[in-house]
Amino acid sequence: MDYKIALIRGDGIGPEVVQEAVRVMDTIGKKFHHNFTYIEVDLGGCATDKYGVSYPEGTAEKCKACDAVLLGAVGGPKWGTDKPAEQRPETALLAIRKDLGLYANLRHATLRPALVDACPLKKETAEKGIDIMMVRELIGGVYFGKRGRYETENCGIECTDLMAYSEMEVERIGRRAFELAQKRGKRVASVDKANVLETSRLWRETMHRISQDYPDVTLEDVLVDNCAMQLVRDPSQFDVIVTENMFGDILSDEASMITGSLGLLPSASIGSNAPALYEPIHGSAPDIAGKDKANPIATILSVGMMFKYSFDLPAESEAIEKAVDSVLAAGWHTADMMGNADQLVGCKKMGSLICEALEN
Ligand code: IPM
Ligand code: MG
């Protein structure tokens, strides 16, 4: 089969990790007889440097003409919060999510067998295992609500960020979560702050209403503060976690940290019509950019998610997972992971090792 993939290499370590993911795709292409074509798309700080804006016109259209999008990372101190919105990389990231309608962000936090010792939790907690599918609503809520800034009479400047959710928005992400749970552990934890927020009360009502359609799945409500605590107390209790945009942003960083390395976790952002977008959970790590020190595994595993969710190629996806696990089990690691000094490798070498494992 032929597949067309938009590559957003981005900023910082983005280009390095995407390069290794491309090598993995090409290796899979050879082995399983697929043909991957790559379309380069500029987005983020690198686009600001080139065109003066982080989200050049036509970006969404370029991506829509492809079967999937692979993104490295965007952002960096060079394009900080003091810059106008149109120059900031984060603005571009939110815009591409919105324009492609990518409402469901899947972040899969697993503790890989070779890395139980890297888990910062107590050994007996880590040994119970972690396999959480975090389903984050991605194009609604406070990230996209109306903002305001105005002068008050006695208190200086006041700002507002509106959090709004419609029933439709909650229902479509909720259904995604239930459907995923049906294929996994059949448990959904719906995270909200219904003891305080009206949006959360609608969230909760909606989750309970649609749960009737998934009698094989157990639904549990968890308040967001409690969820943050449970994630470090006993993460093995969770199967699928579904939550709104900002809660999901925060909890998914927490969920990734407890697996031992941010450098390992992939993500998928999925909509209904447009191509899905795959990216590592980690950021652009400008401090190590260009030094061949980055860990390409999260991006490589994101390709694995792409094969599974966008192309329906489970065997190819599994081959990638297995190759990564075998390289890790052999003790190879990048600087962000623990291990023996003589098995510390750079980004390129890690990519090569995974490609070799795939070829065997
Ligand atoms: C993420 C990131 C983004 C977000 C930032 C860079 C805007 O933290 O993908 O989790 O908050 O969504
Ligand atoms: Mg985040």
Image (cartoon, grey):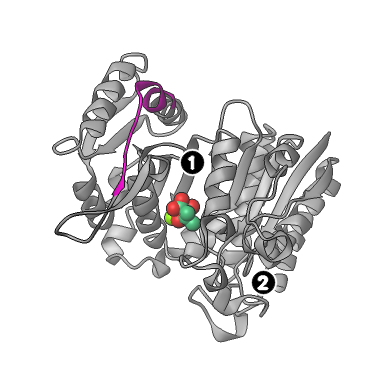
Q: Report if residue 10 is visible in the image.
A: no
168 within the magenta span: yes
Mark 1 and mark 2: span between their CA atoms?
A: 26 Å
User: Disc 2 marks which residue?
Assistant: 347
Against 12, residue 227 (above or below) is: above
- In which quadrant of the rendered image does the N terminus lie? top right
Q: Which residue type does callout 2 highlight?
A: Cys
Confirm if mark 1 falls within 8 A of ligand 1. yes
In the image, what residue occupies the spot 81% across and 52% down? 26
- In which quadrant of the rendered image does the C terminus lie? bottom right
Residue 179 in percent (x, y) is at 45, 25
- When asked about the image quadrant of residue 199, the answer is top left
321 within the magenta span: no
Dot 2: what SS? helix
Toward the front, the furthest residue is 153
Q: Which residue occupies the foreground of this view, 275 or 47? A: 47
Q: Mark 1 or 2 closer to N-term?
A: 1
Residue 169 in percent (x, y) is at 41, 27
Q: Nearer the viewer, mark 1 or mark 2?
A: 1
Residue 290 in percent (x, y) is at 68, 77
Q: Mark 1 packing: few (<14 Cα in 10 Å), some, or many (20+)?
A: many
In the image, what residue occupies the spot 56% across and 31% down? 271
Q: Mark 2 packing: few (<14 Cα in 10 Å), some, or many (20+)?
A: many
Q: Which residues are magenta?
A: 160-172
- When asked about the image quadrant of residue 299, the answer is bottom right
Can you tell which mark lies on residue 138? none
User: Disc 1 marks which residue?
Assistant: 105
Dot 1: what SS? strand
Residue 266 in percent (x, y) is at 55, 52
Q: Report if residue 59 is visible in the image.
A: yes
Q: Which residue occupies the foreground of this view, 115 or 109? A: 109
Q: Which residue occupies the foreground of this view, 244 or 348? A: 244
